[in-house]
Image (cartoon, rainbow, N blue to C red):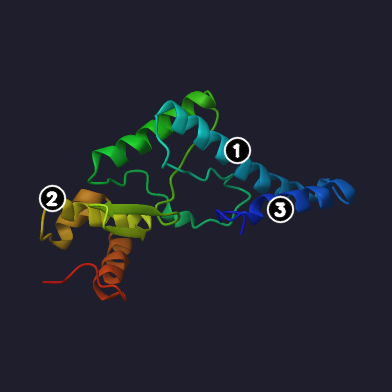
Amino acid sequence: RLLNESSQTSLEASTFKRIINKYFKKKCSKIQTLIQDIDNSKAFNEEFNKICNNDNFNLRILTHTHWSLNEDGYFHNIKYNDDTLNNKFLLTHEFYKLKFNNMRKLQFNHKMGEIILDYDGKHKIKTKPMISSILLLFNSKERLSFNEILEETLINKEYLILCLNNLVFGKNQIVKKF
């Protein structure tokens, strides 16, 4: 719930802080870390977007040991067929290393989060980063083989099969199988 962009986030955080201060501060360190991660993410995004003259790049930077995350979603070499997006990931990574003097490690979980792909301002697709890496390939080619997609995205073969099944046989059927 803390990851949602709702206005309730600040209310929930202040409620947790009152509980922590009043009752059992030592036993609530996990909750404190979760709240701090959200606050730190907002500050990081504001600073990063200000430096990059950007307003639409938003990351959630979470302490790995305190969040139940999908660990198999970390793909270090995933590629996007979009120079702007690749550059943003690279810049974010470098900015994070500079900000924390290489004392912290930043990993992207491409199975979580969302990327909004905007086509001509008329059609928007909100999807997981891993799916968007596949869809962006179709900006340059109309047809792609499974092996071409595998080579271009560097997505693990089993996850690529799941993603493609979702795109081909999902309720919106974004990609056609030939």
In this figure, which residue is indicated by the disc labeled 1? Answer: 40
**Labels 2 & 3 near each other (Cβ < 8 A):** no
Determine the residue located farthest toward the right in the rendered image.
22
Quadrant housing the N terminus: bottom right
Distance from Cα at disc 1 to Cα at disc 2? 37 Å
Using the image, tell me which numbered label, if any, was put on residue 140.
2
Amino acid at dot 1: Asn
Q: Nearer the viewer, mark 2 or mark 3?
A: 3
Question: Which residue appears at 26% of the width and 57% of the height?
Answer: 122
Report the side of 20 relative to 31 (left or right).
right
Residue 40, image x and y in percent? Answer: 60, 38
Residue 156, image x and y in percent? Answer: 31, 56
Residue 139, image x and y in percent? Answer: 17, 52
* 49, above or below 70, in the image: above
Question: Which residue appears at 15% of the width and 71% of the height?
Answer: 177
Question: Which residue appears at 51% of the width and 34% of the height?
Answer: 46
Amino acid at dot 3: Leu
Question: Which residue appears at 46% of the width and 43% of the height?
Answer: 58
Q: Secondary structure at mark 3?
A: helix
Residue 143, image x and y in percent? Answer: 10, 61
Q: Secondary structure at mark 1?
A: helix
Residue 155 seen by the camera: no
* 28, above or below 105, in the image: below
- Dot placed on the residue nearer the N-terminal end, 2 or 3: 3
In this figure, which residue is indicated by the disc labeled 3? Answer: 11
